[in-house]
Image (tube, grey):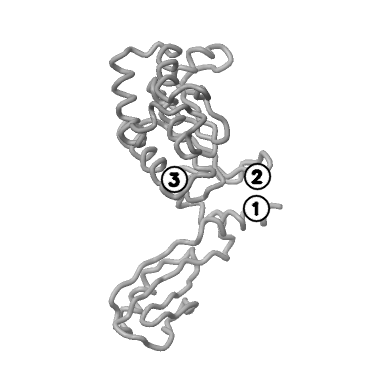
Amino acid sequence: MAGIDPARERMRLAHRIGVVFGQRTTLWWDLPLKDSYGLMRRMYRIPQARFKENLDRCVDRLDLAELLDVPVRQLSLGQRMRGDIAAALLHDPDVLYLDEPTIGLDVVSKAKVRGFLRQLNAELGTTVLLTTHDLQDIEQLCERVMVIDHGRLMYDGPLGGLHAAGSAGESERTLVVDLERELPPIEVAGARVVRVDGPRQWLAFPAQTSAAPLVAAVAADYPLVDLSVREPDIEDVIARMYAGRG
């Protein structure tokens, strides 16, 4: 873990990782948020200049400026979660562990947390490891995915490969076609129309096949304005994986 043996070098490891629990806080309940951060600085022996730089970045990007003087007990769940993430990053950890980081958060708070985590990984190279049941977290944040069922590792690989692993020959992608005008359902080999709404039509086709021949066929025979390909819903993919190995 971060090149350190956890059993022998617990203190050294603690300075290399950050941890955030979705339902438990590391902040001091009765203190203003800024006082919790001051205590964190002393616990981790963070140099003042480094502490200020990290805190300023977190306050700016997690929108915490108006919360610094508020006691933690008065923060909403979304505000506290953002405060906990900032606290876990003040000492520049190499690895950030997040347990259900968006659980119970509203749409705005989820967007702020996800956006910040993407920036953190892209700009500082911090490794972010999260456990979550919110599959939008996976789709928006993860490059590598591990699916675990009752302690068994069912999948470990890129997000794109998850669709193939869970398809079992049944998963379908969707070609969304916008036509110049409303027409009868499109007829092309290898796909079937599953929905029509005015000039827009949805065609389902096997996930493991290429969309290119289908796109070419539609473009050749129909007055096409625009189109897009949608991957199988990740919830359906994972549900099939669990059902197939139950």
- Image location of residue 187, percent across then percent down: 43, 84
- Image location of residue 70, percent across then percent down: 43, 28
- Callout 2, which amino acid? Asp
- Image location of residue 166, percent across then percent down: 57, 56
Separation (CA) of disc 2 from disc 3: 26 Å
> In this orientation, which residue lies closer to the viewer: 11 or 6?
11
- Residue ID at (40%, 68%): 211
Separation (CA) of disc 1 from disc 2: 7 Å
- Residue ID at (43%, 85%): 185
Farthest residue to the right: give it. Answer: 246
- Callout 1, which amino acid? Tyr
> In this orientation, which residue lies closer to the viewer: 66 or 105?
66
> Which secondary structure lies at badge 1?
helix
- Callout 3, which amino acid? Lys
Q: Does 91 appear above or below 118?
A: above
Give left or right: position of 58 versus 79: left
- Residue ID at (57%, 66%): 170
Q: Which residue is mark 2?
A: 149
Q: Which residue is mark 1?
A: 242
Give left or right: position of 204 versus 55: right
Q: Are marks 2 and 3 in contact (CB under 8 Å)?
A: no
> Which secondary structure lies at badge 3?
helix
Depth check, mark 2 against mark 3: the one in front is 3
In primary-sequence order, the first of circles 2 and 3 is 3
Q: Are marks 1 and 2 in contact (CB under 8 Å)?
A: yes
In primary-sequence order, the first of circles 1 and 2 is 2
Q: Which residue is mark 3?
A: 110
Give left or right: position of 226 versus 204: left
Q: Does 140 appear above or below 28?
A: below
> In this orientation, which residue lies closer to the viewer: 187 or 60?
60
Q: Does 42 appear above or below 140?
A: above
Give left or right: position of 93 versus 24: left
